[in-house]
Amino acid sequence: MKVVGITTQQEVYVGSKERNFRINEFLIIEDPYQEDLLGEVVEAKTFNRYIPLNIYGDFVDNSVLESLKALGYDIDEDTIYISKVRLLNEALYPIQTGSDVRLPKFEEVKDIMIKTSREDGLVLGAIKNTDDMALQMDEEFKELFHTFEEGRLMPQKEIPYIMDLKSMHHYPHIGVFGGSGSGKSFGLRVLLEELMIQNIPTIVLDPHFEMDFSETASYLEEKTENFKDKFKCLQVGTHVGVKFEDLSAQDLKNLLDAASHLTDAMNNVVDILFKPRDSYYSFFNRLQMLTEAQEEGSSDKIESRINSGSDEEERRAWRERKKLFESYDKTCPYNSVRGILWRLKRLGNDGVFSKDIREIETGLQNGKLIVIQGSTRILQVFSTYLLNNLYHKRREYKDALYKKTSAEYFPPFIIVTDESHNFAPKGYESPSKSILKEISQEGRKYGVFLILATQRPTLLDETITAQLNTKLIFRTVRASDIQTIQEETDLTMEECRRLPYLRTGDVFISSATMGRTIFARIRAAITSSPHTINPFDELKSKFKEEDERFLKIIIDKLPVMATDLTDLALEIEQETGTTYTVDNLEERLKQMVDKNHIEKEETIFGYRYKSKK
Ligand SMILES: Nc1ncnc2c1ncn2[C@@H]1O[C@H](COP(=O)(O)OP(=O)(O)OP(=O)(O)O)[C@@H](O)[C@H]1O
């Protein structure tokens, strides 16, 4: 392998007759006048005499052709491999054309590829095209994981990509971008498995109900890591919720706003009508009674309701309404009170106020991964409250340490969410966005970190995107998203051009710790998503199950005449409790004939269904 053509201090072409180049592989250039220089292949091509080199004017120019000839290559006869190599560090002078090029040894790249040990890092996968160097790798970096290729589990052959967990202290937030089916959720799963292995307190917002880690992946036979005690799935409204009594007026306004946008007048109503330590019912009642009074329209009309009350209870209730009316009617317009009431009811019906967040806090204190499940809308509401609460607990603890006052310990933690553009959208305000923005800007100081995944980086708030110091970028097809990625990362033009064609599970990792972009393959996950079964396989097995059940019911009753189906339906109902109409039963019997489970024959009295011989 030799340097060919006109060179610069940053880039060279390398030609070879023997060895094909692979994109992203590393090469060492032995310039006789400088130290050895490390470079990375950014483009690779192969030529032979059937494809004349000079038609590819954009990739190799005349200077490359001339120096290939000068170095003894027969460009009309030989197959020639050419690569464009970008140096990792700029050379002092342009590289000497004709310099020898060789593959590096592991030791020569170790420092730029591996930033931490297995114990202190997250093993996410393999650095692609490093198999030559991996042969000489230290034992501690071998056999750390498997990859999953073409339906098969493959042992680790390449250098591992180990994300340095401690570097989050300096480069705190991570973005995970990639289009549908690109391997983004799978990558997120691997990242979360690694956080569980390290016992890092983590909150996961899971709108897809997919971040369950109890199932071991079907391709893993041997006994592997078990995450059962390391995570907990909690559903909003069933296991966790907001304790109304602990809310401040601001918390409540955030929650109601997340349910549906609040006008200024509605905000005002909450400030006036909400009393500290109110319960859901006491606040609800106050609003309800005020609206009932307002519907009457005047103090006189309410007075007449008091007078015509049928019993003392009713008279007392109307007296209370009158008091509310006189105190608040002027400051709280009817429509705004109704608006608050409607939002409150909506949250109440979703069960948001039926539980508290104690289980989440205890889980985090114990180093667990807590998965919060619910619809996107509910999660938007709940996460606003939850993240504010937890973030401020951690802040209070850290501030108290600084001021040398006492405060209850609250651990550092990581917040993870898929579909993050729904929680922090670009272009408009949302309550969950303000807390995520605050954490993206200040979280580092307090040890609170973000991992935000999205299919649509273009729709994610720009201030937050700019704070994501590490980005995992999977296959992306949409031009606007590729453009955003180009603007927000250090991916080169060549790398961005490759984005639409990446294989599922292959990823560019652009990280400040590494100082450059690494091309990697995400390792095989240890666990699998509860939604991995193909819906068409599900249908097939459901039909099969149904058929078997039906056959079991009717097989002893065969043969049966088509004219006797009424009696048969009755008999089945008495024996099994399952009701079939005659049409239904006939349809099912015909299906069984079509599927070759039973037979149908014609007799002089009509059709007869019978078992197969
Ligand atoms: N690193 C990988 N190795 C092997 N298979 C993978 C890998 N990543 C993903 N896959 C497979 O590809 C499929 C799609 O992956 P995944 O569900 O993660 O896509 P996605 O990008 O999250 O899509 P969506 O955003 O639509 O959920 C999955 O069935 C998964 O098994």
Image (cartoon, rainbow, N blue to C red):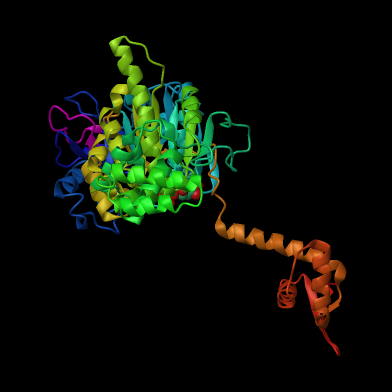
Res 82 seen here: no
Instruction: Pinpoint residue 53: horizontal percent, then vertical percent.
Output: 23, 54
- The number of numbered discs placed on residues in the rendered structure image is 0
Q: Residue furthest bottom?
A: 604
Q: Position of residue 575 (x, y in %)?
A: 83, 63
- Pick the residue in front: 591 or 129: 591
Secondary structure mostly seen in the magenta stretch: loop
Q: Quadrant of residue 471?
A: top left
Residue 91 among those drawn in magenta = yes
Residue furthest to the front in view is: 307
Q: Quadrant of the N terminus?
A: top left
**Residue 2 sits inside the magenta stretch:** no
Where on the picture, by quarter, is residue 383?
A: top left
In the image, residue 145 above or below residue 63: above
Q: Which residues are magenta?
A: 86-101
The residue drawn where x is 40% and y is 47% is: 289
Name the residue: 30% across, 59% down.
Answer: 50
Relative to 175, 531 lies left or right: right
Q: Closest to the observer: 371 or 491?
A: 371
258 over 231 or under it: above or below: below
On the rendered structure, is 429 left or right of 285? left
Residue displayed at 19% across by 26% down: 32
